[in-house]
Amino acid sequence: MPKTSIIPEGSGKPLAPYVPGSMADGVLYVAGTLPFDKDNNVVHVGDPEAQTRHVLETIKGVVEAAGGTMDDVTFNMIMITDWDHYGAVNKVYAEYFPGEKPARYCIQCGLVKPDALVEIASIAHIGK
């Protein structure tokens, strides 16, 4: 099955060998997305709501570049560094998924840069 790399215009260079999104057979896999600017600096240090919004806007850009909308997202994998941020993350998350919610999980873990508080990876069904 052929796959297509999805790289929205203006994307920064990834920290590792991956692309923002990969689409195969109508399914889009969005890479783990951190609150980074184009130079891979963490934005909104100390603010889990603003970081979550930044991450979800970045994911939205990948989904839209693949021809979809956030309504096409069927699964999210959420990683947070502190359970104290869980409520803030959910508050913003609910704005991006106001209707039927995607399946998801959320775990607490360390992230690649200490100032990053949240990372989200997504799966969206766009084609067929």
Image (tube, grey):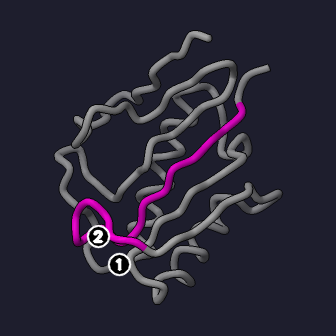
Residue 65 image label: none
Give the residues drawn in magenta, as a range.
109-125
Rendering quarter of residue 15:
top left
Kindly check if marks 1 and 2 are in contact, taking CB atoms under 8 A apart as contact: yes
Left or right: residue 20 compared with residue 77: left
Residue 116 located within the stretch drawn in magenta: yes
Going by the numbered disc 1, the residue's amino acid type is: Asp
Q: Position of residue 7 (x, y in %)?
A: 40, 27
Q: Is residue 74 above or below residue 41?
A: above
Q: Which residue is mark 2?
A: 44
| Quadrant, the N terminus | top right
Which residue shows up at 39% across the image and 67% down it? 51
Residue at (53% x, 81% y) in the render: 86
> Quick one: 4 or 44, which is closer to the camera?
4
Total numbered badges shown on the rendered structure = 2
Look at mark 1 in the image and give the residue it sits on: 47
Residue 120, position as x, y percentages in the image? 49, 56
Whether residue 88 is in magenta: the answer is no
The vertical placement of 72 against 19, above or below, is below
Dot 1: what SS?
A: loop
**Which residue does the image show at 64% across and 65% down from the upper left?**
95
Within-10-Å neighbours for mark 2: few <14, some 14–19, many 20+: some
